[in-house]
Image (cartoon, coloured by chain):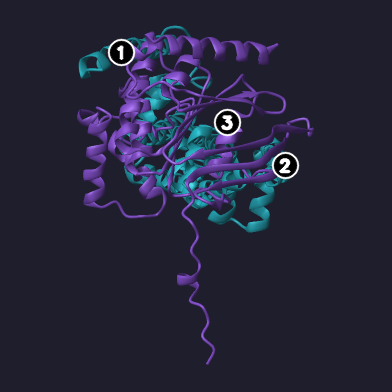
Amino acid sequence: MLSRPDPIMSVTLPAPTHAIRFSTVGHQYRASDGQPMRALANIDFTIERRQFVVVVGPSGCGKSTLLRLVAGLLKPSEGQVDVFGLAVDSPRDDIGMVFQRPALLPWLDVEANILFPIRHRGQRITAADREEAQATLELVGLADFRKRFPDELSGGMQQRVGIARALLMKPDILLMDEPFSALDALTRDEMSFELLRLWSARQGTVLFITHSITEAILLADRIVVMSPRPGRIREIIDVGLPRPRSPETLRQPLFHDLADRLRGLLMEIRL
Amino acid sequence: MSAAARLRRLVPPAATIAALLILWEAASRFGGLPAWLLPSPSAIVQAGLSVDAGQWLRHLLATLRIVVLGFAVALAVSLPLAFAITQSDLIRRCVYPILVVIQSTPIVAIAPILIVTFGPTDVPRVIITAMIAFFPLVVGISTGLAETPPELVELSRSLGAPRWRQYWEIRMPAAVPYIFAAVKISITLAVIGAVVAEFVAAEEGIGYFIRASTAFFKIPRAFAALAVLVAISLGLFHLTVLVQRLLFPRSLKTATDK
């Protein structure tokens, strides 16, 4: 009898070091007038595991499309998006998403909202899940609001619930689509530091979209600057600021240099 | 709102209605308003009381039966239809013109035809009632399903949930305020539908009773029957409000926030 190589033992794929890889990705969609529109063209870059990558760019540069490709909500017209070495063809369990608006279900209380993904995937909610929910609520500072309804919370608190919901599933990758854009400036900074604290505790990979230059520099390891029509990568900036970052970071000369550079780039793109 | 405050809010409308009734009574007694044209409120009440309670109950239950059955059929037809319309643009474009045609057809004119084709049973009455009641249901429910905030739909998709869960756990609950708004309109239309059907052919029911009364020029009695119809409509309307308040208290809150 011929001995065949054991498929499990013989195939030694190296564990992919990258979390997300865009390989010459392009995306087209049909506009309401039926004309094909190019949202993205020739996107080629890699996000390493545990990196915090922020995408900035003017409206219409395809930032959200980029995020939705990773989430498996859209399929690329050209190229391929890989997550942990596998092409994305549908939503994955190990990716959590935080939306621009908190996307909470108004008829459910806070606890039921953050447990909703479990139920919506057709799984039973266990006592352990409830404990985990309580722990996650403590993590985002909402332990006392478990039985409140979304309309009883401020905008910042609602967005915390949205983040807690994404964190509960312990995702390896967190996708965040301008999550703080609806908040006032003060709450916004507060939430940024809060997010950094959570991220350093969990050490997942984050892909974060924003319009805000301050937010981008404060959060990111790398900033991807995009230009519109079609959305392309204009430049990738490595943020060399030390961690942990704090309000002190905002006063460092390097922060201001980066802000100037980023602002200059965005002005150029707009012209 | 406290109970006392709620009661205080009732004073102005109640006083207005009381004043109108007094004015009406006075016009009949001292103003020379002829009884055959418009009987006085007291005459209507008297006529109503002169009819045997068992007889009232029989007619009332007959009408309610048609209303409830007709409304149930309307709901059973409009729910899947609303889902189909929301789900597929092609179906929406195919079905919508037909809905509008049905809505534009005077159902009162169809009633005699249906009575002849189906015979004098409950079937044509229920169909007539359902035809009048179902349009606001389809429009209301499909609007509610379609108006679900897009970020909630995206949440569902990002979780990889099957389509039926998206409808059952997100779109349906999100549509609850719309559904109840539609039911409030539809249930009162169902009463109109039942009466129209009873006008055309029936042996019992409030509609039949009005026709029978007017045939013998018992105008006060016809008015008493009319008052009973108004009571049925108001009762069903408030029953709907009550059901919504008991089962979906949060949906009232979001409705007032809008």
* Label 3 CA crowd tier, 10 Å (few <14, some 14–19, many 20+): some
Image position, residue A146 (x, y; %): 24, 33
* Kind of residue indicated by mark 3: Ser
Label 3 resides on the chain identified as: A
* Kind of residue indicated by mark 1: Arg
Q: In this view, does B130 lie above or below A124?
A: above
Tell me the quarter of the image containing the C terminus of chain A.
top right
As helix, strand or loop, the secondary structure at mark 2 comes to helix
Q: Which residue lies under the disc numbered 3? A: A64
As helix, strand or loop, the secondary structure at mark 3 comes to helix
As helix, strand or loop, the secondary structure at mark 1 comes to helix
Colour-to-chain, cyan: B
Image position, residue A121 (x, y; %): 41, 51
Image position, residue A212 (x, y; %): 50, 16
Taking A239 as reference, is B98 left or right? right
Q: In this view, does B62 lie above or below A147?
A: below
Q: Which residue lies under the disc numbered 1? A: B9
| Residue B204 vs residue B34, the one in the foreground | B204
Q: Which residue lies under the disc numbered 2? A: B93
Taking B7 as reference, is A66 left or right? right
Spatial separation of the CA atoms under disc 1 and disc 2: 46 Å
| Image quadrant where residue B231 sits | top left
Asked if badge 1 and badge 2 are on a common chain, one would say: yes
Colour-to-chain, purple: A
Label 2 resides on the chain identified as: B
| Residue A126 vs residue B183, the one in the foreground | A126
The residue located at (51%, 78%) in the rendering is: A5
Taking A25 as reference, is A122 left or right? left
| Image quadrant where residue A79 sits | top right
Q: Tag 2 or tag 1, which sits nearer the N-term?
A: 1
Image position, residue A123 (x, y; %): 36, 55
| Residue B129 vs residue B41, the one in the foreground | B129
